[in-house]
Every structure is written in C-alpha cells, then in structure tokens.
Amino acid sequence: MLSFGSRCAWSTGEINDYNNQTKEKAIYEARRFNADFGGTDILAPLVQASTLDSGEYKKRIFLLTDG
C-alpha cells in the first residue's frame, strides 16, 4: 500500500499474494492512515505503483482518497 498527499510512502514496498493474512494486514494499515500528508498529488504515487515490478502477479491498483 502506498500513502500519498504532497508526498508518498510505501507501507511495504512489495507486491504480495492476496490471502486472509495480507487482507488483514492491509485493513490494519488502512485503519492507521491519517489525512496528514498535505495536498493531494495523485500523479507521483500512481506512477510509482504502475511501474513497480509485479513479477508473476497480475497488478491491480485501487485508489482511495479522503476527499
């Protein structure tokens, strides 16, 4: 997961299998998010997410915002 605003930061920085464990980790991480990154610069995190090497995994990008 990638948090973004006027800056962006990876939660893990890697692509994982989707299973109950990774789903629960994603829910846990999302609950810890705060709207404290300033602004809403969407382009930079979308570029980072789209260029991350997904290897054998099919890549799906979900964009969630606070506004």
Image (cartoon, helix red, strand yellow):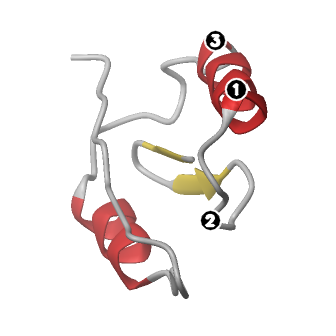
Q: Is residue 50 above or below residue 25?
A: below
> Mark 1 or mark 2: which is in front?
2
Find numbered disc 3 in the image and state the secondary structure of the residue it sits on.
helix
**Residue 57 on image: x %, y %:** 50, 74
Rate crowding at label 3 as few (under 14), some (14 to 19) or many (20 or more) other CA atoms within 10 Å.
few
Rate crowding at label 2 as few (under 14), some (14 to 19) or many (20 or more) other CA atoms within 10 Å.
some
**Residue 45 on image: x %, y %:** 38, 62
| 57 or 47, nearer to the observer | 57
**Picture residue at 37% right of the left edge, 67% below the top:** 59
What mark, if any, has residue 15 been given in the picture? 2
Q: Mark 2 or mark 3, which has the lower sequence index?
A: 2
Q: Is residue 3 above or below residue 35?
A: below
**Residue 35 on image: x %, y %:** 48, 19
Q: Residues at badges 1 and 3 in contact (C-beta under 8 Å)?
A: yes
**Residue 9 on image: x %, y %:** 62, 54
What mark, if any, has residue 31 been given in the picture? 3
Residue placed under numbered mark 1 in the picture: 29
Callout 3 amino acid: Arg
